[in-house]
């Protein structure tokens, strides 16, 4: 149910629907895209970025909120920590219980390593669980890993590390097969052919899905497999600092019970960092589609221990976050809604952008429409544009929405909006951390031995923008590689004396750079309470 | 000022803006959540909640992140429920109806009270999918239970001690692995990649100058 004041605009959308279905806007040229991004994409707002004063990426720009965390004090600053009696002693310590961490743990276990997962919430409380639209893999006869490579490389503005991207696309079909064999239910026709669609920026229909619960279906299956294998999962326990050994290699982590605040020591031969994204940092004040714990913890842990970041200045704003009603402000509206035929429409009822431009371009186009052009729809939280969902039923036939995007139908249905009959209002939402820790193709951090990184905490796989469906893919491909590499490496590793000297050294570096702050990091959770602490 | 409603968090009264979800209302009241909060978008099942409206008898179940507060709501969150999860080897399990009898025999003690269905936060027909599981109809159980977020409210209401979400999880994995048709084009492609069929192509892309890759990208032929 929309408020009365939106009626004129809503009538325009409905009145022009038939015309708008028939109309396909031009795709933008490379030059048009570039000038649009420069003028309207949040990554290009210079005043929102600051230069780091310390650490491996000193002198490089990152979002100011991230700089605050990277240059904050350790939660252990001033604490005496006894590392001589570890509470846990394993071969492979996996930090993070999302898709990448779980895939890594399964592979490390399969390789015979003693592996343990620590996670600050529950296993499965992760962006993986919330990924709706799908997972890419070039497994149809008209497609190939090479075409997938070009789509992703161009979509990421030719900035991806090619050796990572080639791993991603070449191992994609195998990743789908691995998931299928674990029992993940992909949408298939009666003959077993995958039902695939386009995503923004794809040149072939290679988006595999499990309705619009693709990530949830993958995550719950991986979690079930972790539990079946008896892999210990220490939940509600955050890693708050990496531990190195006297050889300068990653060798464990200091852990903190999120409820009792008890500190624990985990010693490990190798560490897999799979801590995920950063939406809850709310860069530039944007709402987010991310889960509660997405606070860039892994970047802070890795950076303080000497691992370098790559592309930490680039974030993905998903073009279609829910903008109405306010209860779901920022929640993800899957790109699949556009894959299935819904178009973006301004307040006057006009189609203003091709529905399948890449995410950064579509987001910038919406920001332009709502800003300078003044064609936005007023909502309680600001402005947005229409996403004309009833087009899907017109194009695909009655029942398409319920069959293909039931989660979307449910989410809006809770608030009296039947997306089969009424369009929805959307605005960009902070969705994905394109950058992260710099890794080699075996997932080892470029500058820190025995630290492996997988999932959203990695930078460089996608370049400066990520295509839909390549993130669910990367957590599986690189999660598995990280687990295999970490297990193999653990067999040839003798852990030296444990040390936190790097933490003290980093504190000294902060002081030398003249940084004064009361903040401590990693952030662990956002604070949404109204009451101030006394 | 926005209109407020009175709610009762674990019995204690708070006045909160009427537009808030239960989760936001708890935060508004000053709770810094650790448990009972996950994706905040209705996918993870961390925030299962049971409530009763003052003066009424019926218990309702919901996800705190997806439900607006109402006047007189008595709210208790259920951040964890001890579901029984049986372990098995997906490689060795057989898609026969005896699987359920071996792993989850309690489903055959269902008394048909339908409390599970009435309490489902996703509005699923839980008792029906358990009935499919009893018959070993994994495909139907998988389909009927697909939107389950495993919050556990159904099990908290079950007099037979059934862990419905775990039964459904098993059915979906069996269905995905053994019952759903195999995908020939996927198997073919994996074999092609393994045989090195794309190595030269990819290697060529790895070496190409940036300008050539830009050309390739900007002139792609896009499948309709």
Image: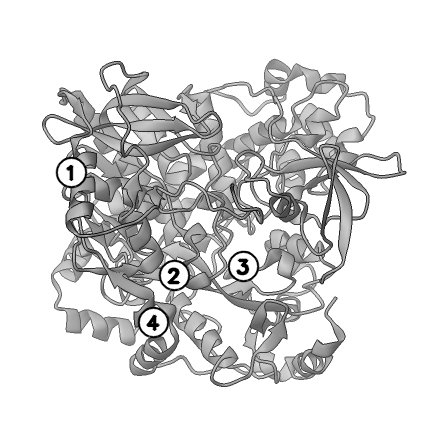
Graded by Cα atoms within 10 Å as few (under 14), some (14 to 19) or many (20 or more), the crowding at tag 4 reads few
Circles 2, 3 touching at the beta carbon (< 8 Å): no
Up-down: is B2 above or below A210? below
- What residue does disc 2 label? A316
Mark with earlier residue (1, 3): 3
- What residue does disc 4 label? A45
- What residue does disc 3 label? A330
In this rendering, do the residues under marks 4 and 3 share a single chain?
yes
Of circles 1 and 3, the one toward us is 1
Write down the chain letter for disc 1: A
Query: Distance between the Cα atoms at labels 2 and 3?
Result: 13 Å
Picture quadrant of residue B37: top right
Residue A375 horizontal/vertical position (percent): 55, 83
Graded by Cα atoms within 10 Å as few (under 14), some (14 to 19) or many (20 or more), the crowding at tag 1 reads few
Is label 2 in a helix, a strand or a loop?
strand
Mark with earlier residue (4, 3): 4
Write down the chain letter for disc 4: A
């Amino acid at each position: 149910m929309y408020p009365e004041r939106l009626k004129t605009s809503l009538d325009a959308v409905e009145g022009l629907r038939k015309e708008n279905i028939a109309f396909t806007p031009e795709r933008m040229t490379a030059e048009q895209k570039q000038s649009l991004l420069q003028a309207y994409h949040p990554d290009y707002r210079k005043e929102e970025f600051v230069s780091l004063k310390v650490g491996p990426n000193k002198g490089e720009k990152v979002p100011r909120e991230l700089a605050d965390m990277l240059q904050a004090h350790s939660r252990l600053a001033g604490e005496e920590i006894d590392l001589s009696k570890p509470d846990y002693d394993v071969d492979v310590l996996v930090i993070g219980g999302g898709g990448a961490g779980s895939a890594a743990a399964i592979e490390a276990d399969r390789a015979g390593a003693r592996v343990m997962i620590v996670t600050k919430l529950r296993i499965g409380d992760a962006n993986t669980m919330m990924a709706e639209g799908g997972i890419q893999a070039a497994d149809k006869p008209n497609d190939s890993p090479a075409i997938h490579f070009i789509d992703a490389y161009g979509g990421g503005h030719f900035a991806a590390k090619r050796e990572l991207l080639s791993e991603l696309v070449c191992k994609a079909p195998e990743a789908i097969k691995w998931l299928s064999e674990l029992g993940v239910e992909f949408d298939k026709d009666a003959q077993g052919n995958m039902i695939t669609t386009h995503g923004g920026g794809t040149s072939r229909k290679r988006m595999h899905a499990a309705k619009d619960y693709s990530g949830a279906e993958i995550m719950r299956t991986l979690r079930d497999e972790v539990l079946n294998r008896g892999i210990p999962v220490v939940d509600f326990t955050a890693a708050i600092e990496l531990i190195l050994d006297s050889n300068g290699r990653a060798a464990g982590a200091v852990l903190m019970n999120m409820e009792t605040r008890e500190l624990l020591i985990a010693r490990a031969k190798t560490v897999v960092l799979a801590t995920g994204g950063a939406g809850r940092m709310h860069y530039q004040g944007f709402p987010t589609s991310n889960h509660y714990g997405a606070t860039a913890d892994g970047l802070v842990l890795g950076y303080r221990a000497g691992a370098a970041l790559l592309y930490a200045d680039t974030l993905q704003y998903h073009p279609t976050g829910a903008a109405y009603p306010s209860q779901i402000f920022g929640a993800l509206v899957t790109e699949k809604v556009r894959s299935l035929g819904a178009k973006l429409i301004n307040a006057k009822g006009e189609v203003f952008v091709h529905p399948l431009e890449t995410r950064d371009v579509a987001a910038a186009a919406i920001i332009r429409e709502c800003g300078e052009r003044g064609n936005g729809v007023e909502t309680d939280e600001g402005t947005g544009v229409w996403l004309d969902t009833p087009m899907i039923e017109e194009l695909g036939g009655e029942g398409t929405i319920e069959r293909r995007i039931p989660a979307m139908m449910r989410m809006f249905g809770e608030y009296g909006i039947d997306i089969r009959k009424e369009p929805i209002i959307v605005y960009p939402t902070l969705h994905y951390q394109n950058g992260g820790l710099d890794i080699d193709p075996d997932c080892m951090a470029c500058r820190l031995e025995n630290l492996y990184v997988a999932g959203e905490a990695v930078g460089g796989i996608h370049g400066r923008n990520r295509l839909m469906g390549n993130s669910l893919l990367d957590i599986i491909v690189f999660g598995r590689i990280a687990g295999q590499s970490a297990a193999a490496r653990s067999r040839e590793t003798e852990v030296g004396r444990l040390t936190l000297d790097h933490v003290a050294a980093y504190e000294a570096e902060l002081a030398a750079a003249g940084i004064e702050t009361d903040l401590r990091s990693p952030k662990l959770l956002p604070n949404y309470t109204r009451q101030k602490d006394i | 000022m926005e209109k407020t409603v009175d709610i009762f968090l674990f019995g204690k009264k708070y006045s909160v803006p009427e537009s808030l979800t239960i989760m936001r209302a708890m935060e508004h009241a000053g709770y810094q959540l650790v448990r009972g909060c996950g994706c905040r978008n209705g996918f993870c099942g961390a925030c299962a909640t049971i409530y009763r409206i003052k003066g009424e008898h019926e218990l309702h179940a919901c996800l705190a992140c997806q439900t607006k507060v109402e006047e007189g709501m008595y709210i208790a969150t259920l951040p964890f429920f001890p579901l029984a999860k049986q372990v098995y080897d997906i490689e060795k399990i057989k898609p026969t109806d005896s699987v359920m009898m071996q792993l989850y025999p309690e489903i055959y003690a269902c008394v048909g009270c339908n409390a599970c269905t009435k309490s489902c936060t996703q509005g699923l027909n839980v008792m029906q999918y358990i009935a499919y599981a009893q018959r070993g109809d994994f495909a139907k159980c998988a389909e009927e239970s697909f939107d389950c977020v495993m919050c556990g409210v159904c099990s908290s209401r079950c007099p037979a001690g059934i862990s419905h979400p775990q039964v459904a999880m098993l059915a979906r994995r069996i269905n995905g692995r053994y019952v759903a048709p195999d995908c020939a084009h996927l198997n073919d492609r994996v074999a092609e990649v393994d045989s090195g069929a794309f190595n030269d192509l990819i290697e060529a892309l790895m070496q190409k100058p940036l300008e050539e890759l830009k050309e390739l990208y900007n002139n792609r032929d896009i499948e309709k």
